[in-house]
Image (tube, rainbow, N blue to C red):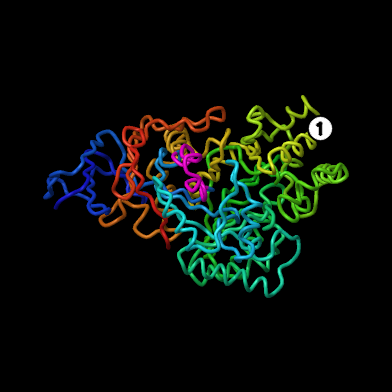
Amino acid sequence: MSLDLLISGGLVADGTGAPLRRTDVGVTDGRLVLLPEGGPFEAGGARVIDATGLVVAPGFIDVHTHSDAVTLLGAAGKELAAAPVRMGVTVEICGNCGSSLFPALPERVAALRRSSRAGFGGDIPIFQDYGAFVEAHGHAPRSNHLTSLVGHGTLRAGVLGYEDRPATAAELDTMCALLDDALAAGAAGLSTGLIYTPGTYGDTAEVVALARVAARYGKPYVTHLRDEMSRVEEALEEAVEIARRSGAALHVSHHKTAGKYAWGRTERTLPRIAELRAQGMDITCDVYPYTEGSTSLSAMFPPWANDGGTEALLDRLRRPGERDRMRRAIEDGVPGWENTVGNGGWDRISVACAANHPEVEGRTIAELGGDLGDPVDIAAELLLAEEGEVTIISHSMREDDVQRVLASEFAMIGSDGVPKPGHPHPRLAGTFPRVLGRYSRDQGLFPLESAVHKMTGMAADRFGLKDRGVVRDGAHADLVLFDPVTVADGATYADPLLPPVGVEAVVVAGRPAVEHGTLTGELPGRIIGL
């Protein structure tokens, strides 16, 4: 047998959760070959990687990212785009939280581009359909693979805009047709972000209708719940209702119980999910290994403030009377609204990315308010100065809740990485090594084989990624080699793109994208359809 690449001397964690075993692994024509001890095979001109002392695992599959556009931005996004593969991620699933780069009716594409900014001084590209999304990425070489869910929020905006009203029957039919086309073309499933506008304007019945389309294709309904704070249990039940009525498999994004009124509720949500699984429901979740989340500063304001999109929000923020209404809404709450600040406080909201005002990055809104005035006014003025594009970090979870979700047998790993300039959440560059080092090795939360399974085989099964997430004959040649003794995250809130320790090599489509912990310059990644 002739090989293109030979990885010798390593311990294989095959992605199934099976015990480690010593096996040499070959690559030929982009596929894996497990080599019996003593051959027969010919190393010949094959490139050889000595994996002595290392674990050889399937490339990690990040089931929850927001990397949809970063490689389309060219040099401006290069460092951010490299962070996932440096920590071993060979497949990213984007289009999460109801936000994808497609689809939209032709007459709405230009308006959506103007209302969705990338944080790099330009508009986010929005595409009419999945095919245009794939074509654009075909002209933007990448180091790892990408696939995308279809965002409910994008569907809604792409058909009826950012209006706070129910979709008409005709509009819902159009949304379903656009979703059907995207799934038929290879998109990975349906996502919702039911705390974000315009997704939050859609009711349960609307999402059920769309999830039925996903169910016909055997693809999952993936949801950022309508509330992850004080009403998290109610929001979970809405997701369960959607799954039952539609017949779609249910996947709960970045499951958490955030804010002081929800701390400890994983002791109820996780047994509920386990109960549903025991009853036969196909339900899973993902989690990132941090007690801090990250989102847009605009999401700190009530849904009605965002009615009409970014420009409408900015117009309201310019008016003192509207600001007072928003201040009261945050203080008193709004029925059905998650209200992150009301559940925590402005002292738990720090600025991650404000491209035109880097001096405020890393500081909380409360700190800025202490220097300059009322926190609501500070947040409003910052959004106005940045044309609505400000990313924040929310210090909202408790460690015991994070650990309970991580340890659950139905939880896989997703970084929820947001590749924006400034001080992005370190999960973009540290999630997977952090699970292996901090939670598996150091804290003993689960064995290494289980950790790898959560990052690979379990994720591939959930999203129908055929021949990925496993080390076996004929599987795609996506691999990560790491030192189990030293592997750890390096990224911090102060320096969020620091690479991990102990990730020695990453192979994508049979080509080393990382060697000795350093990028090789190879760009073998592609869009993978399902």
| Main secondary-structure element of the magenta-colored stretch | helix
Q: Position of residue 330 (x, y in %)?
A: 80, 43
Based on the picture, tell me whether residue 77 belongs to the magenta stretch.
yes
Residue shown at 36% from the left, 36% from the top? 519
Q: Which residues are magenta?
A: 67-82
Left or right of 54, for residue 495 = right
Whole-percent x and y of residue 361?
64, 30
Q: Is 261 in the magenta?
A: no
Q: Amino acid at mark 1?
A: Asp
Q: Quadrant of residue 57?
A: top left
Q: Position of residue 421 (x, y in %)?
A: 56, 37
Q: Is residue 453 visible?
A: no
Q: Give the left or right position of residue 477, taking residue 380 as reference.
A: left
Relative vertical location of residue 143 with respect to residue 362 in this rendering, above or below: below
Front residue of this view, candidates 88 and 122:
122
From this view, report whether residue 524 is shown above or below residue 529: above
Position of 139 with respect to 165 (left or right) is left
- According to the image, label 1 marks what residue? 374
From the viewer's side, name the closer residue of 422 and 215: 422
Q: Residue, x 56% and y 30% (percent of image)?
A: 493
Residue 468 picture quarter: bottom left
- The image quarter in which residue 461 lies: bottom left
State the residue in front, 140 or 183: 140
Point out residue 179 in the picture as x, y percentages from the top left corner.
Answer: 56, 67
Q: Which residue lies at the image location 62% right of the left edge and 68% below the top edge? A: 175
Tell me the residue at 79%/47% (across/down). Answer: 315
